[in-house]
Amino acid sequence: MAVASAREINQKWFWKMRNYDVSPDLENELKRPVGHDYTRDWVPASQFPSEVHIELLHRKLIPDPFIGFNEHKVQWIGEAEWLYKNELEIEESMALATLDLEFGGLDTICDVYLNDHLVLQCNNQFRSYAYNICNGAADSSLLRASGNTLLLHFKSAKLQALDEARLRGFHRGGSVNLGDPSRLYVRKAQYDWRWDWGPELMTCGPYRPVTLKAYSTRIQDVHVKTYIEPTVTLKVDIELDGRPAADIQALLITLRSLTGEIVKHEKRTLAISDSGHHVAMNDVVIWAHLQDKGVELWWPFNYGKQVLYDLEVAALGQEDQVIDTTSKRIGFRSVKLIEEPLSAPDQYGLGTSFLFEINRVKIFMGGSNWIPADNFFTRITDEKYRHLLKLAREGNQIMVRIWGGGIYEPDIFFDLCDELGILVWQDFQFACGVYPAHEEFVQNVAIEAEQNVRRLRHHPSLALFCGNNEDYQQILQWQERLELPARKLYEEVLPQTVAKLTDPPIPYHRGSPYGGKEWWDTADPTVGDVHQWDIWGGKELPYQQYDKLGGRFISEFGIPSFPSMHTIRHWMGDAGQDQYYAQSPIIAQHVRAGSFDRRFAIVMNDNFRVTDDLEVHAFRTQVMQAEGVGLAYRTWKQGWAGEGKEYTSGVIVWQLNDCWPVVSWAIVDYFMRPKPAYYTIARALNPLSLHISREVTKNRNHDRPKQFYEFGAFQSTEATLTICASSTLLTDTQATLSLTYFDIRSTGAAAAWRGKPRTTAEEIPSNKSLELCRQRCPEPPADEATINITSAYVVVCARLIHPQTDDVLARYVDWPEPYKYVQFPEPGLKVAVKRQKDGSASLIVEVERPIKSLFFSVQEADEKDWEVMWSDNNLDIVPDDPQEIIVKNLWERKIQYAYLGSEKARLLVE
């Protein structure tokens, strides 16, 4: 009896372009020699898994498509056909068993040949495929004694999509700046066709492992079911595969801590009638009352520990011989999506909640949307996944939403989320389109869904499956006919799959956004989730109006910005300095957002002074992004108002990361350099945070935002300050509220004026937001230079201070707007730097006058500058309130800084 074994086929792969002129048939292609001319010869693969663009780049056969205009020089690759081959080496012992060839992921249209025989036709990047080569030595198979050849023939997904669309009809595929709508017919990462933040790079190849598996009988699948009510309980479903299943006499089940300590283990003998069936165990309680054995719950970070366990299942034969083993890393937790009537209306009406409850605790979900971290998946290392997700955690982001136009991320992504305590909203892979629902398509998606639900369901980080991204929205956005064929998927196939395969059930949501009148009104703020795009796009409102544009759960919103100048210089390549301006063609090549010049002009001219300096403009767009999304987080978080008043239960910004160097909505750029917005969001999502809202009384009515301090005919007469606190802590907080005021005028006798501080004792209740106080903003006295002084010159600093230790628990600094009218004072900045032997450093930052958006970075770019981690950044600092920044992995790198009023980076002299 053969013991189950598996071997990755990751050596001795070759690739080439399919050349019909040189070799009219595949048999002739296989006979081509090894060489360097990929149009004629077989070229050794540089890595495996592999993608054709990566192979071409490795050998410098194409220019880097991420630099300059090179994207357009490589479009031919997506229309060509490509071949990969491998000479399979099969050990004699494996040939005596059942032998399967499994493909973890083929991108996308691929015919698989074994020894010149077509054995698989694959058309779904999101599925795995398997071919049963033989069932033991007596089986008549395609195997040869030696020289077994595996051939993968990748055809053009782009051309096949067009053929399908011509046959079945073209349908709406999102907005005009997305890729060709024919993409809807092919189960391939949709952003490959181009998106409004990404290039069109139609790659292909075996992008996930190829594995040879040998067995007589094996464990096919283990469904782990963890319950915390009424007791901590573990159930399993165990499926067997192979002939004869009766070879398995027993199952040994072991639960271990991550330190290797055995928590529980048990041997379950199987009767012949049991082991002879495909399902060896079905909904069997293995252990109950596990809390009595010290088993702890898994919690999202900030709420508890991320306790994980390894569940091992061993199939035993006669004399307890181990025939096969499998293991899953699990956590014990419960997750619920609660949509219940609210107890009182908010500004939008009554409606229902849309909130997540983890382990019976209602949790406010702050986080970000995730897109693939590269256009070429085989270039995304485990290290990159870890660093990006670590940034999310360090930025207080408790949830990431895997967007529906990319891929189902690999196991390492979910393993890291389990480890870091980050919850995952998982879209099924449909985005911005009227998808088809003909029988073949539906059957293909059903298999895709089942495979991915089975693969992901055991992860404690998995909080939600969602049917699609913005497909229902096509009705409202484009006045499409009131029928989406793929409702069959979103309302039948997908929810039925999730319900059948998850227990306890993982929540399912039909689409994002979804809710409102008879399902199609996806902009209804009183129900479901919303995507808020009326600031950038839509109505193009000022970002100061985010407080009027909320909803029960905002799963998308954002404002784009330019990335770091280091990143811009990378894509500029060898472009001359005459191309370093914001409206240059090469900049436009790396901005994919629709109408970006006009939209940037509106929001930037509303708030900042006009400049033709690219570095100054880039920094100001970053500050603009930080100000806009930061305001959204702080004001929407006020909607987390307590039991029955969960008016806003989650805010997920678009987007965390980039797939190439680009001007985009990302708060961390392609090279993993956080933008200022990243730090602003992190502070807004602190377990304890503050916000100040200014409401201006003007001398006449007009339509400008209430936060704006107008000048001339529209000068304000006074302003009211509303100070609010938000707590996601599970205990009440005693604190002292301190308010201080500063005049920022750079000239005049009143320049040193400070308002009289206010100090009050406050109790901040747990897990809710509330208003602490409301008062008139103090005004400095008039002087000779200014006849009528208003609070338009006053900076307000609010702090929550621990009553015993005087530690600052939360702070927020509010400035008058718009910034284009503000004369920023010379701050008298002082930074004391203390470097440590371990590469870290501490920065103590003080000012003589208020400073706005102080941002530190490293002066020179290098391959590892992403390792530099700032504990805080993009700071507003006032006098007598020094702040400390801890910097990890700085080493000998030099520090530079910029701030509003001095936007060109300066070297920090230590």
Image: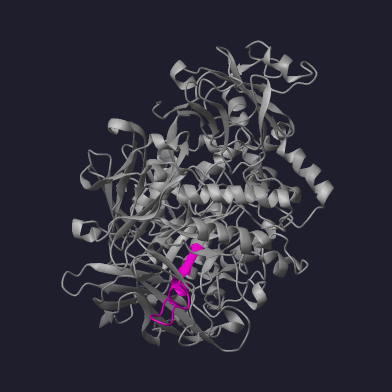
Q: Is residue 392 left or right of residue 295?
A: right
Indicate the position of residue 746 as horizontal and vertical percent values.
Answer: 43, 69
Indicate the position of residue 123 as horizontal and vertical percent values.
Answer: 67, 40
- Residue visible at 47% across and 74% down in the picture: 648
Q: Main secondary structure of the magenta part?
A: loop
Indicate the position of residue 680 as horizontal and vertical percent values.
Answer: 42, 61
Q: Is residue 321 visible?
A: no
Is 892 covered by the magenta stretch?
A: no
Quarter placement of the C terminus: top left
Q: Is residue 895 above or below residue 100?
A: below
Q: Is residue 583 above or below residue 469?
A: above
Q: Is residue 55 above or below residue 338?
A: above
Where is residue 149, by image quadrant? top right
Quarter placement of the N terminus: top left
Indicate the position of residue 515 as horizontal and vertical percent values.
Answer: 60, 73
Bounds of the magenta segment: 633-652
- Residue visible at 43% across and 36% down in the picture: 218
Is 643 covered by the magenta stretch?
A: yes
